[in-house]
């Protein structure tokens, strides 16, 4: 089984499944033709993907301006301990994880992904200027929790919009394009923060103020240029046992819970949780790199630029490669690269190139995983529950990273940074081995338990161009 098992789930139940199957058969020629990347959208990249990428680019400039200076502001400026920062960073991500479920379910229930995503972007934009008024841990924690609430609301609906605007065989490329644009914002945000800190007398407050203005611009672009769900191309959902009908009836909570009966989705969620438990927060990676290399505080805000630059260059190629050779291979390779970066931080000599190597590996990790995982989820979940399915996996991963932030901050405080990172690296190695087994390719002709054979005609190895001609790997 590939990651998200690139073979689609088994055939639809009842008359509805038969209709989708006939539709797939009618499109065999287009799907199997060489270079038929555009599928039903008529374009290599749908306008909705480009519009959402622009919104993410602008919003990420705003968010990363704050993220780039926040660790130093809290630890050096407010005197927060590594344990305290780990707790705050965990809350920062844990709140987002819990709200993802609500955002995904609401988007599917009201059938307006743009509306729920817009509420999330708007709430995050409102929180940025509030940081100007907070100068202690309590208020900052509340503001960051609200900002992450906005992120949680928007993430699943946004990813659902992307998946519904791209054909199944180009999901990895579509998410890669979006993540590349998103990462452009992540590249520009720390650079903007660095420049502001260099010219403004009250540097941190200036960063927070400019960040709020940029976030408002992102909301404006979303409202004006991103189509609502009704404006997206009509794509048939992935074939499989649908937990809820695709008709006009509202999506219920029990329909969402029924998604967990899909074996492939359960496998994805399990692996996302296991690997999230041993993925050290970006902020801790940058703090470790600064301490290891003796980098001056004034250069700290530039460290995320290295990760973002590599991510930007490789996001689209990695997504296209995942569509071609299998998402499992690319996803696990990304975690192997992250493990190599941990090893360099722990044991490499003090090479001048060490910071560049670690940041390059960090960016390659994100390029190989950040867009590949939602593309994998999209292949397993019916269109009517797309946002909910993405929220289930995303919530599990984010909660696991919340636990990792708490544990790593505590281990750093008790044992020091080196032993804490060594423990995380050992855990990542073990969890990656488990994930490799859980997501291993199925034997040719085998059907995972709980699926109903046969697969839809358009998803057979002979007609799906997203599948390697040499079969499962």
Image: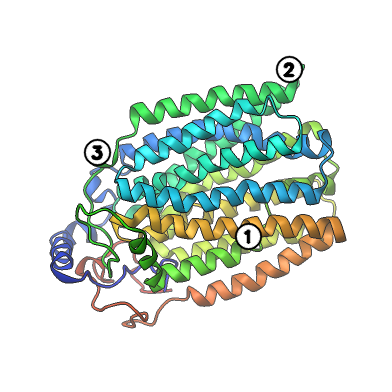
> In the rendered image, which quarter contains the C terminus?
bottom left
Image side of residue 179 versus residue 458, left or right: right
105 versus 464 height, above or below: above
Q: Position of residue 148 (x, y in %)?
A: 57, 42
Q: Position of residue 231 (x, y in %)?
A: 24, 38
- Cα–Cα span, label 1 and label 2: 38 Å
Question: Is label 1 or label 2 in front?
Answer: 2
Residue drawn at the location 68% of the way across and 47% of the way down: 89
Residue drawn at the location 20% of the way across and 69% of the way down: 457
301 versus 432 height, above or below: above
Neighbor class of circle 3 (other Cα within 10 Å; few <14, some 14-19, many 20+) is few
Look at mark 2 in the image and give the residue it sits on: 200
Look at mark 3 in the image and give the residue it sits on: 231
Marking on residue 337 = 1
322 versus 164 height, above or below: below
Neighbor class of circle 1 (other Cα within 10 Å; few <14, some 14-19, many 20+) is many
**Circle 1 sits in a helix, a strand or a loop, which is it?**
helix
- Cα–Cα span, label 2 and label 3: 44 Å
Mark 1 or mark 2: which comes first in sequence?
2
**Front position in the image: 401 or 439:** 401
- Cα–Cα span, label 3 and label 1: 39 Å
21 versus 306 height, above or below: below
Number of numbered markers:
3
Q: Position of residue 262 (x, y in %)?
A: 37, 71
Residue 349 occupies quadrant = bottom right
Mark 3 or mark 1: which comes first in sequence?
3
**Front position in the image: 128 or 366:** 128
């Amino acid at each position: 089984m590939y990651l998200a098992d690139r073979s689609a789930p088994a055939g639809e139940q009842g008359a509805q499944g038969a209709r989708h199957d006939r539709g797939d058969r009618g499109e065999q020629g287009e799907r199997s033709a060489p270079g038929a990347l555009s599928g039903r959208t008529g374009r290599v990249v749908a306008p909705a993907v480009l519009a959402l990428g622009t919104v993410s680019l602008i919003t990420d400039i705003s968010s990363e301006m704050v993220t780039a200076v926040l660790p130093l502001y809290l630890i050096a400026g407010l005197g927060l301990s590594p344990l305290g920062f780990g707790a705050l960073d965990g809350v920062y991500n844990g709140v987002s994880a819990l709200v993802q479920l609500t955002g995904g379910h609401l988007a599917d229930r009201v059938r307006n992904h743009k509306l729920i995503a817009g509420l999330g972007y708007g709430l995050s934009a409102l929180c940025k200027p509030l940081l100007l008024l907070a100068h202690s841990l309590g208020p900052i924690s509340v503001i960051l929790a609200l900002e992450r609430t906005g992120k949680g609301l928007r993430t699943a609906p946004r990813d659902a919009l992307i998946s519904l605007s791209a054909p199944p065989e180009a999901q990895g490329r579509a998410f890669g394009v979006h993540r590349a644009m998103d990462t452009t914002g992540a590249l520009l945000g720390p650079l903007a923060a660095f420049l502001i800190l260099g010219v403004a007398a009250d540097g941190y407050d200036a960063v927070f103020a400019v960040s709020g203005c940029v976030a408002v611009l992102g909301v404006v672009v979303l409202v004006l240029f991103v189509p609502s769900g009704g404006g997206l191309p009509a794509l048939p959902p992935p074939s499989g046992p649908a937990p809820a009908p695709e008709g006009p009836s509202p999506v219920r909570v029990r329909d969402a819970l029924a998604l967990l009966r899909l074996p492939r989705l359960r496998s994805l969620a399990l692996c996302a949780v296991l690997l999230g438990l041993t993925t050290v927060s970006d902020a801790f990676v940058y703090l470790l790199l600064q301490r290891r290399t003796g980098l001056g505080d004034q250069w700290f805000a530039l460290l995320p630029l290295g990760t973002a630059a590599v991510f930007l260059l490789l996001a689209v190629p990695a997504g296209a490669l995942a569509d071609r050779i299998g998402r499992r291979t690319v996803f696990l390779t990304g975690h192997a690269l992250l493990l190599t970066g941990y090893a360099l931080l722990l044991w490499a000599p003090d090479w001048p190139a060490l910071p560049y190597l670690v940041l390059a590996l960090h960016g390659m990790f994100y390029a190989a995983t950040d867009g590949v995982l939602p593309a994998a989820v999209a292949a397993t979940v019916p269109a009517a529950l797309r946002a909910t399915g993405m929220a289930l996996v995303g919530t599990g991963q984010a909660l696991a990273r919340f636990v990792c932030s708490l544990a790593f901050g505590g281990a750093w405080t008790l044992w020091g940074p080196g032993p804490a990172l060594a423990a995380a690296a050992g855990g990542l190695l073990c969890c990656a081995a488990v994930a490799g087994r859980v997501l291993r390719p199925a034997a040719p002709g085998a059907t995972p338990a709980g699926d109903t054979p046969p697969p839809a005609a358009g998803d057979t190895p002979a007609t799906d161009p997203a599948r390697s001609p040499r079969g499962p790997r």
